[in-house]
């Protein structure tokens, strides 16, 4: 009996290894799946002679799967999410079963901390203890990761004792990352039930940095205008130094339009997308006045975060990059530039892929929405 079990296991392992090898040979494509609160985005990329080819991409709103409108944020039940992802894979014609999924910023925490200069093994034992000071839930509920912030990004807040903000002897700067285990478990269940292989999951901000930033040593602010919140990161010398959430998002703009024009959310969402901040067609001339205070609020808060960072680190944040579905609001770029006073551009993640030329206009427009999904798939191509 035991011998039988042994051979059964051996056979199963062999089979699974063979399937892995086989599927790996059959297809070198990977998907990037970004599960947002208001819409789920997917892309499929493959590598051909060192170039990254865009094979397909697609997006589905979550609202209709949760009894709400397009554009509304909704935490879908696992069953409804499974249905949505299955529909999306079918509609977008995703053919690979292997890929990378996003972990939302709200299920994670990114902070930089000072720790004694010790070797990696020692660091591994110190970090869970140190992490308790920063993480508001039990350490057993999170998965921890970290990386050493390399010099010269290893700068510190200048103060009376350290007016130059020099690295402090004996201390090393660590970027500490914690992910809520529930978020990982939910994704694992989703992947298993849909028979997908997802060996890597990644916090969304890391993915959009990969897809939208170039090897730039200057400090950049990246803002993801999602449905219920706007997520912001400051990236300096290639390393995330600040991760911040602004509790207003693109959905709030539709809600403001809905109130101001006394129309249902669905209609307000349509009007917002059509009118935005520039055109003022008859009957809709108060759309802009309903939306602009919220947009100004978001960028004023982002600017506060930037000013604090610049002061503490004596670095200049010299540009903003906008991503997320909310970024494509008509007229947003001009208002954003006014608020922050430095150049603002849309993230162009599709530029890191090759696609038929006739798609270029469509992809430029869709770019900000797909920043996370493309970043995930790029990581998949590198590591899976
Ligand atoms: N053309 C458009 N003009 C203005 N707003 C738009 C447009 N297209 C989409 N949006 C807005 O973008 C928002 C969705 O953005 P996105 O897909 O980045 O959010 P999400 O990823 O689902 O949210 P989160 O990242 O917070 O989980 C919606 O609120 C929608 O109203
Ligand atoms: Mg998102």
Image (cartoon, grey):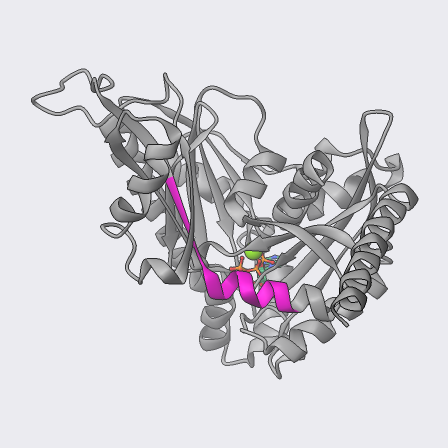
Is residue 236 or residue 71 the one in the foreground?
A: 236
Q: Position of residue 380 (x, y in %)?
A: 70, 42
* Vertical position of residue 113 compared to residue 218: above or below: below
Question: Which quarter of the image is occupied by the N terminus?
Answer: bottom right
* Residue sitting farthest toward the bottom: 67
- Inspect the magenta stretch and tell me whether residue 73 lies in it: no
Q: Is residue 362 visible?
A: yes
Q: Residue at x 87, y 58 (%)?
A: 93
* Vertical position of residue 384 compared to residue 292: above or below: above
* Residue sitting farthest toward the left: 160
* Residue sitting farthest toward the right: 26
The image quadrant that residue 69 belongs to is bottom right
292 horizontally vs 366: left or right:
left
**How many discs mark residues in the rendered view?**
0
Q: Residue at x 51, y 56 (%)?
A: 104
Query: Over which residues does the magenta segment extend?
Result: 176-189
Is residue 187 or residue 317 the one in the foreground?
A: 187
Q: Position of residue 225 (x, y in %)?
A: 51, 52
Secondary structure mostly seen in the magenta stretch: helix
Q: Position of residue 138 (x, y in %)?
A: 31, 62
Q: Which image quarter has ligand 1?
A: bottom right
287 horizontally vs 155: left or right:
right
Question: Which quarter of the image is occupied by the C terminus?
Answer: top right
Q: Position of residue 312 (x, y in %)?
A: 23, 29
* Vertical position of residue 251 compared to residue 267: above or below: above
Q: Residue at x 58, y 42 (%)?
A: 207
- Inspect the magenta stretch and tell me whether residue 179 lies in it: yes
Q: Is residue 253 visible?
A: no
Q: Residue at x 57, y 51 (%)?
A: 324
Is residue 251 or residue 339 the one in the foreground?
A: 251
């Amino acid at each position: 009996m035991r011998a039988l079990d042994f051979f059964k296991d051996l056979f199963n392992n062999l089979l699974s290894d063979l399937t892995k090898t086989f599927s790996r040979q059959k297809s070198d494509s990977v998907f990037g799946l970004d599960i947002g609160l208001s819409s789920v985005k997917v892309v499929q990329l493959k590598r051909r002679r060192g170039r990254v080819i865009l094979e397909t991409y697609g997006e589905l709103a979550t609202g209709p799967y949760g009894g709400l409108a397009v554009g509304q944020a909704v935490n879908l039940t696992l069953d409804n999410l499974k249905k949505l992802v299955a529909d999306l894979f079918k509609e977008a014609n995703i053919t690979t079963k292997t890929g990378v999924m996003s972990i939302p910023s709200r299920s994670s925490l990114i902070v930089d901390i000072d720790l004694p200069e010790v070797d990696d093994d020692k660091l591994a034992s110190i970090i869970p203890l140190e992490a308790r000071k920063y993480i508001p839930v039990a350490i057993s509920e999170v998965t921890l990761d970290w990386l050493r912030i390399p010099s010269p990004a290893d700068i510190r807040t200048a103060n009376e004792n350290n007016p130059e903000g020099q690295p402090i002897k004996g201390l090393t700067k660590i970027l500490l990352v914690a992910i809520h285990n529930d978020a990982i478990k939910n994704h694992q269940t989703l992947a298993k039930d849909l028979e997908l292989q997802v060996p890597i999951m990644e916090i969304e901000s890391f993915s959009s940095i990969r897809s939208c930033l170039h090897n730039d040593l200057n400090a950049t602010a990246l803002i993801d205008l999602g449905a219920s919140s706007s997520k912001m990161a400051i990236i300096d010398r290639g390393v995330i130094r600040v991760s911040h959430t602004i509790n207003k998002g693109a959905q709030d703009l539709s809600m403001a339009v809905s109130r101001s024009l006394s129309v249902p959310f669905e209609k307000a969402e349509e009007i917002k997308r059509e009118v935005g901040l520039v055109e003022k067609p008859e009957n809709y001339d108060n759309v802009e006045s309903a939306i602009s205070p919220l947009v100004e609020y978001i960028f004023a808060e982002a600017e506060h975060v930037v000013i604090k960072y610049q002061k503490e680190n004596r670095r200049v944040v010299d540009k903003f990059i906008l991503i997320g579905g909310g970024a494509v609001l008509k007229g947003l770029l001009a208002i954003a530039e006014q608020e922050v006073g430095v150049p603002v551009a849309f993230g162009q993640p599709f530029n890191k892929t090759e696609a038929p030329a006739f798609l270029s206009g469509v992809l430029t427009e869709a770019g900000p929405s797909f920043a996370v999904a493309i970043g995930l798939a790029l990581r998949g191509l590198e590591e899976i």
